[in-house]
Amino acid sequence: MKKNVLIVYAHPEPTSLTRQLVEVAVQTLQEQGHRVMSSDLYGMGWKAVFDERDFPCRANLDRLALITESGHAYSTGQQTADVVAEQQKLHDADALILQFPLWWFSMPAILKGWVERVFAFGLAYGYKGEGNRYRYGEGGFAGKRAILAVTVGGPEKDYSPRGIDGPLEQLLFHVTHGMLFFSGMDVLPTHATYGADRATAADVDAAKIAWRLRVEQLFEEAPIPFRSQNGGDYPDRHILASDIAVGQSGLMAHIGEKRGARRDKSLI
Ligand SMILES: Cc1cc2nc3c(=O)[nH]c(=O)nc-3n(C[C@H](O)[C@H](O)[C@H](O)COP(=O)(O)O)c2cc1C
């Protein structure tokens, strides 16, 4: 079935591996009959910082309370045009692909700024004006899929389970879990292309094939089974139940075997 896919990418150099892999995604999706929307953040001159210029019609001129202003601008239709345009693309999208180089173990600042500005209060958080009632698996972006496609300078072994950098999926947990799943999306395992700075022509060809195979499965692959807030694993909506992930703590405790296995109707 034909779907809408939004690719948001952050790289200033058209010949970069990141940008080459964006082209692979666009081509693959179009060949599958999907509609591709894209946001070339550097090309658009995207404003990366979240500040008072995001709120031309302030709720409170005495103090810049960003969450309050975000909710006010969103609910009263007074957001800036660039943010509204990105939210419209997201609204139309069945899937979101974020493509970027790993910079200091995270996404480039311009992409973080896209999330900060586009994920408004009332939409991506504070959904329906209900505080944290709907988060982690529910919220304004529920029903959409998402995947990160990341080029990484270091070799894969640096990111292996005991590698010096730590596992990439844990380093990017703040994005997959903290931004995308938080706002309701189903997030697929991250696609990484390691050793990106030393890639030979053959490596680039192999990277393109590997990414193409992932893109072809965008609507088929099982998402990371993050535990949903309201699925029963967090009885008070904050802390895991004592009989869940016994003996585990930290980030990985929030990944279950099967999402929603202990659904508690009283919390829905
Ligand atoms: C500011 C900056 C920070 C970087 N941080 C990391 C890092 O934390 N880990 C890593 O393996 N590589 C790091 N690199 C290397 C990039 O990941 C690498 O250059 C990029 O993925 C190459 O792909 P590209 O052709 O798409 O730019 C960094 C590069 C820059 C410019």
Image (spheres, rainbow, N blue to C red):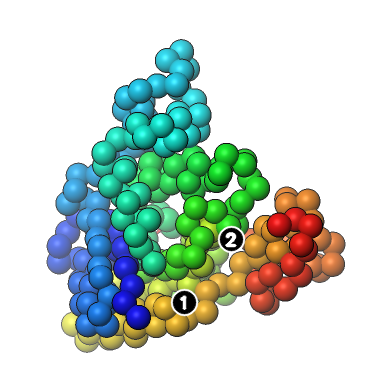
Residue at the disc numbered 1: 157
Q: How many marks?
A: 2
- Neighbourhood count class around disc 1 (C-alpha, 10 Å): few under 14, some 14–19, many 20 upward: some
Name the image quarter holding the C terminus: bottom right
Indicate the position of residue 75 as horizontal and vertical percent values: 44, 35
The secondary element bearing badge 2 is classed as: loop
- Circle number at residue 109: none
Indicate the position of residue 53 as horizontal and vertical percent values: 31, 27
Q: Determine the image quadrant of residue 76.
A: top left
Compared across the picture, whether 258 is left or right of 72 comes to right
Compared across the picture, whether 27 is left or right of 86 comes to left
Compared across the picture, whether 87 is left or right of 178 comes to left
* Amino acid at the residue labelled 1: Lys
Residue located 49% across and 52% down the image = 140
Residue located 47% across and 57% down the image = 141
The secondary element bearing badge 1 is classed as: helix
Indicate the position of residue 62 as horizontal and vertical percent values: 46, 13
Q: Determine the image quadrant of residue 250.
A: bottom right
Residue at the disc numbered 2: 137
* Amino acid at the residue labelled 2: Gly
**Looking at the image, can residue 155 be seen?**
no
